[in-house]
Amino acid sequence: MKTLFNNTGYKLYTTEQPGSLKISFSYIRNSDGSLRWFWNSKSKKPLFLKFYNASSFKARLYAMAVKMVFELGLQNLIFEKETLYYKVEGKPVFNIKSSWAIFTGTPGPNNKALLYAGGSFYKIACTETAKDLLINELANIRFASTSRLFYVPKTILHNGNILQTTDISKNGQRKNSFGIIHAKTVKGITNKYQRRCSIADWGYFQMLKKDLHALHDERIPPNLIRKLNAILEKVDEKQYITLSFSHGDFTSWNCFVNNNMLSVYDWELASCEKPKGFDFFHFIIQNGILIDKKPWKSILEEIKQKNRLTFHFNEDELYQHLKFYLLTNILAYLKLYSEQKEWHLQIHWLLQTWTEALNLFAKEIYTERQMLIMDIFDTLHTTPYAALKFQNREPEKLSLDSDIDMLMSSQNAENLIRFLKRNHLAEHMIISRKSFMYRVRIVTNDNQQILNLDLILKIQWKGLEFMKVDKLIKRSLLNEFGVKTVCNTDTAKYLHYFYTLNGSEVPERYRDFTEKNIPENKLQKISEHINQLKIRTNQRLSFLKNTFIYINDTFSEKGFVMTFSGVDGAGKSTVISEISNLIEKRYRRPVKILRHRPSLLPILSVWTKGEEKAHHDVVNSLPRQGSNNNTFSSFARFLYYYTDYIIGQFIIYLKYVLRGKIVLYDRYYFDFIADARRSNINLPQSVAESGYFFLMKPKFNFFLYAAPEKILSRKKELSYKSVCHLNAEYNKLFSKLGKQNDSAKYIAIENNDLNETLNIIMNNIIKTK
């Protein structure tokens, strides 16, 4: 504060000095305790609101409350106050005894204080870099002042480090939304100067690239840097780009709408070296992040909409100019932030959105799943956490069949989930809360890839905690790719505890690792602890508590039923086997495969032939060879199997679905409707079709079919006519059921290509909640 006033012609003292005069300052602090605004305590008006962007509803309420305090004369009771002493030295630029207010500015190499007094603003440079910016601003305002499309302030430079500008905000209004007036102004600024040049000859861009290579700041998320480098490597240096005159910090807080014209100030970052559209993108993106707190996908949508007001870029032009806006702006600010000792919260907001915005141009290099993994670890960069059993390589190279286990607090887990809900790469997300963890399943937009996260809050067995999460996080290590991982000793202990408590040996792939990282004396202590845990689980209170927790966790995420129908030879068995594997490995859900029905009741022939002989006959007989034409016998057979479905569906639901398992039926009740002969039943189709009304409807039902020639090449037992007839019957049935029931899916798939069939099935599963 003392240095600041020295520049304005006054010297401050904390105690009375010969010839000094007394003055009182009132002030408001930043959240970190530093001064934000201060003013002459005798001021009758809250002039510091001149520095405040009161464009949001919450901000307007705050401004109204402050004005009310001053109207009632309560400011000296409400705000902190300090008494100081001053002397006049040289020629002051303002009258310290009058009404004035000062904003201390943003800390960093470009720091400038902002004084408002006597109807003018005074920018006071606090660093040598800031002095250069004031001189640059003076030149830029003079260059821009010839335009008739917008207003700029009049300026006077005092002593080389104070820039006085007239107050052009009178009767004006700040507007957060980018409108026609803003568009007219941006085009007016752009048209002051434009030129085309190759990327190789673009000096400003080449300088920023060099600055990036020299950047070493551990506070900057590492995957943001890696994305930048990857995108920069793909830039064609021979490519041409349009550069233009730009304000450089064109935002809602640097302009006022006044008489259908825009008054624009704060021109210190203006230059002719920025890509065309820079100010257009900057206004929408900065406002979206800092004022509206929008996710990137909403910001991008606004850019596309407002482009119609401004430059009318076609899609390729829009993305090209957006790409170079992001690159130049991010590179410039990363250098600036690296020179700041303390970072304010807004910097983290900006970094988080920037790394997500770069995904738009990194998708040529990474899959969406890979970019999402990078975004996750970047957003956790300053958060206490530890990845468990995580690879020591680039995080995005995690295999498709692997998930990510992370230890963290409940609050940090909830923060991460909020971030994921806003991330545009996450098309669909399922969250399951257990007593000790959050299980998060994310589906990306491209190729519907799945990423599974286990956010572990407690490390426990049967409700008993055997390792402390917070201690493991404290002992975690940062690997060379910026991922905080559980140290080797704790990982080895965890593996030993986990497998031993669950009654199995440590797998061979982990055995050398655990033996190497757990000393013999520690192993003995772990064994004793395991024995104590087992004893505690048998105690009455612990048993009741653990049973309750187990039931709650077991039923925290329900499963569902899927059915596969079609004629023999359509490829059901192969598809079911592959789908079962995909669900278990990538969807991370246990699978139960059932044949045709719940099988609560045995096949009918068991009652006459015995179980062994009956099953032997079924295996060795061909389908659809039964000769039953008796209506009564057919009805009795149908009623028997229908009873199995009616009762068995509840058993299946309780035993598997409620416990989170995915039940796959190889054939289902639909056979009784479309192909009753296969079960040696001869009844009108309407009988079996009516019975379906009383059954629980499976969530997904797939009818697999293929050309008769293809089916007959696999299964020669059927005739060409039979295959055509059955395909038609199943297709008609699925079409009819699909129209009758919105809660279940009935999908016919021509199974010519296995991978395509699997993709269709998995896409339907993962897209549906």
Image (cartoon, rainbow, N blue to C red):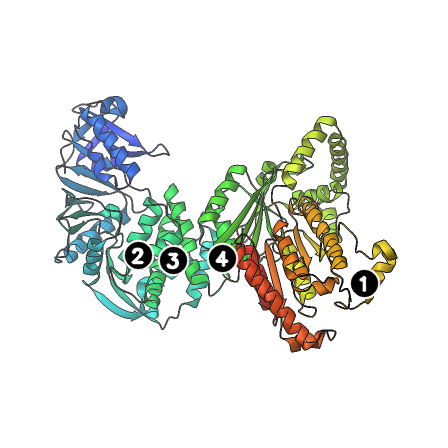
Specify the amino acid type for callout 2.
Phe
Q: Could you tell which of marks 2 and 4 lies nearer the N-terminus?
A: 2
Disc 3 designates what residue?
211
Amino acid type at circle 3 is Asp
The residue pinned by badge 2 equals 281
Q: Are marks 2 and 3 in contact (CB under 8 Å)?
A: no
State the residue in front, 504 or 112. 504
Residue 318, given in percent of the width and then of the height, sits at 33, 64
- Residue 682 in view, yes or no: yes
| Label number found at residue 585 | none
Q: Nearer the viewer, residue 659 or 9?
A: 659
Q: Which residue is mark 1?
A: 618
Q: Which residue is mark 4?
A: 371
Which of label 2 and label 3 is nearer to you? 2
Q: Position of residue 457 (x, y in %)?
A: 59, 39
In whole angstroms, how far apart are the C-alphas of marks 4 and 1?
Answer: 52 Å
Left/right of residue 25 with respect to residue 393 in the rendered view: left
N-terminal of the pair, mark 3 or mark 4, is 3
Q: SS class of the residue under badge 3?
A: helix
Of pointers 4 and 1, the one earlier in the residue sequence:
4
Q: Which one is earlier in the sequence, the residue at label 2 or at label 3? A: 3
Q: Tell me the amino acid under the disc marked 1.
A: Val
